[in-house]
Amino acid sequence: MIRRNFLTDAAAARMYIEGVKRLKDPAQFPWPGRDDLSMYDMFVFWHHQSMMMMTPPDQNDRNAAHSGPAFLPWHRYFLITLEGFLRQAVNNTNFRIPYWDWAADAELDEPATSPIWSNQNLGQFARADWRVRLEMSLRTGDLQIVDRSLDRALGGGRLPTRNEVRAVIRDQTAYDAPPFNSFSSSGVRNYVEGWVGSEAIHNSVHIWIGGDMSLSSSPNDPVFFLHHCNVDRIWAAWQERNAGSAYVPDMSAPDTLQFHRIDDPLYSVFEDTVTPGDMVDYKRYYEYDTISDLADLQT
């Protein structure tokens, strides 16, 4: 099945919007054992918890899903899991999450005027009927129960350009490199995540949207999943160009890299056991309508 561009496939966009609204409704998709919370809210909890689980616990950089090699496979797993619930919500087994091609919006004079933010698209989630129920406390870092509207502050910083993305895919031929954290000076993972390189690819999009997207509870904003779908598309394009470059680290790496070694279980709130190795072959789950805009696969 195909993941498509949110702004060029109206049917996929409409289905995504309807699906997340249904998942957000505790009456339709309740979070078992949690009063007035939905399965959508559970994904907010899951993401926050992943960021609070430091590995190893005596440092404040790499956690179970960020600032390390598992960043890309963990978010691929996160998206695939949400996708399963969305297919139930829209009653369509062919549905796949669309992506937001923010590099196209980076070319606009005013990216905040992109149609993705219109009231027919993601602008509608800024209305009062979309409620944030769980958020990261800026004072303690804990997750707390709230009841408020979604917060955005579009335009902080800049969106990455297509040429910047292409350069990372072209120049980074290894997946990751020691010390396998935010200080790794080479490897596509850290460049795409955005801790090194002027592109700051993934991180700069969170910053540009601002508001709830700047918190560990960032999945409160439905754009989170469209953004990460595009990040995953970048990884897919890199994989096609660098098919001989393996995921690292393998299981010979020390236990301090728990959650990030190829056969470690990825951190999950479900009972299933999924590893980074299970996530390497994205074509087991979906394909993209195009990756040719991101990488010249002939050279």
Image (tube, rainbow, N blue to C red):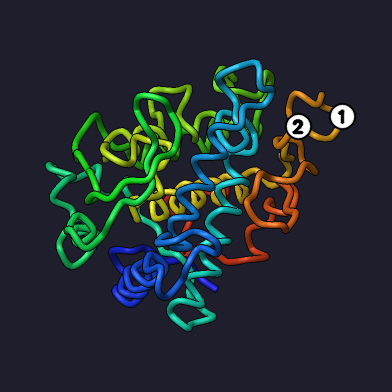
In the image, 276 versus 198, the foreground residue is 276
In the image, 184 versus 57, the foreground residue is 57
Q: Where does label 1 land, which residue?
A: 252
Residue shown at the point (33%, 73%) measured from the top left: 18
Q: Which labelled disc corresponds to residue 97?
A: none
Three-letter amino acid code of the residue under disc 2: Pro
Q: Split into 4 quadrants, where in the image is the N terminus?
A: bottom right
- Return the x and y of residue 277 as percentages of the image width and height: 75, 48
- Return the x and y of residue 185 as percentages of the image width and height: 57, 18
Residue shown at the point (24%, 29%) measured from the top left: 157
Direction from residue 265 to residue 62 in the image, left or right: left
Q: CA distance from mark 1 to mark 2?
A: 8 Å
- Return the x and y of residue 12 as percentages of the image width and height: 37, 73
* Crowdedness near tag 1: few (<14), some (14–19) or many (≥20) residues, C-alpha within 10 Å: few
Above/below status of 224 relative to 166: below
Three-letter amino acid code of the residue under disc 1: Ser
In the image, 81 versus 134, the foreground residue is 134
Q: Where does label 2 land, which residue?
A: 249
Residue shown at the point (61%, 32%) measured from the top left: 53
